[in-house]
Amino acid sequence: MVALVLLVTLIGGATMASVGLLGLLGRLSPNSLAGIRTAYTRASDENWYAVHRFGGPLLLFGGIPVVSVSLALLPFAAAGKVPDAVTLGAGAGGAAVLAISAVAAWWYGTAMAKAR
């Protein structure tokens, strides 16, 4: 049951990495579901693409390690070979990395887009 924490973290990391890659490549269209959705990014398509182009790498590089750690631990946690504290710690650490990456991508992406 504790392995579910890693599964949720894995899905969050994969989603963040995907959004980061699409934003970096300029392929994340303005939408109301995924991405950095602020008043500034919603003001124009130009703002949306600029913020995601600059913030995308931070989302990508935040999501990839979380996916890697989750994939590495998930089979062992599901088999009960890893202590629950380690599984919960990895899940909490992954959630923290995702949150920090999201805030950093928003801040840096917006600052760089406004500076251009």
Image: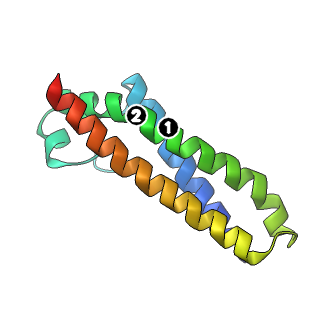
Eyeballing the image, is 62 above or below 54?
below
Q: As drawn, is 51 to the left or to the right of 98?
A: left
Helix, strand or loop at label 2? It is: helix
Q: Amino acid at mark 2?
A: Gly
Q: As drawn, is 41 to the left or to the right of 61?
A: left
Q: Amino acid at mark 1?
A: Leu
The numbered dot on residue 60 is 1
Which residue occupies the extreme left position in the image?
43
Q: As drawn, is 44 to the left or to the right of 16?
A: left
To which quarter of the image does residue 114 belong? top left
> How many neighbours does mark 1 have within 10 angstroms: few (below 14), some (14-19), or many (20 or more)?
many
Whether residue 3 is visible: no
Give the percent coordinates (x, y) of residue 115. Answer: 16, 27
Figure label count: 2
Whether residue 50 is visible: yes
Q: Quadrant of the N terminus?
A: bottom right
Eyeballing the image, is 24 above or below 111?
above
Q: Quadrant of the C terminus?
A: top left
Q: Are marks 2 and 1 in contact (CB under 8 Å)?
A: yes
In this figure, which residue is indicated by the disc labeled 2? 56
Residue shown at 76% from the left, 60% from the top: 74
> How many neighbours does mark 2 have within 10 angstroms: few (below 14), some (14-19), or many (20 or more)?
many
Distance between the Cα atoms at labels 2 and 1?
6 Å
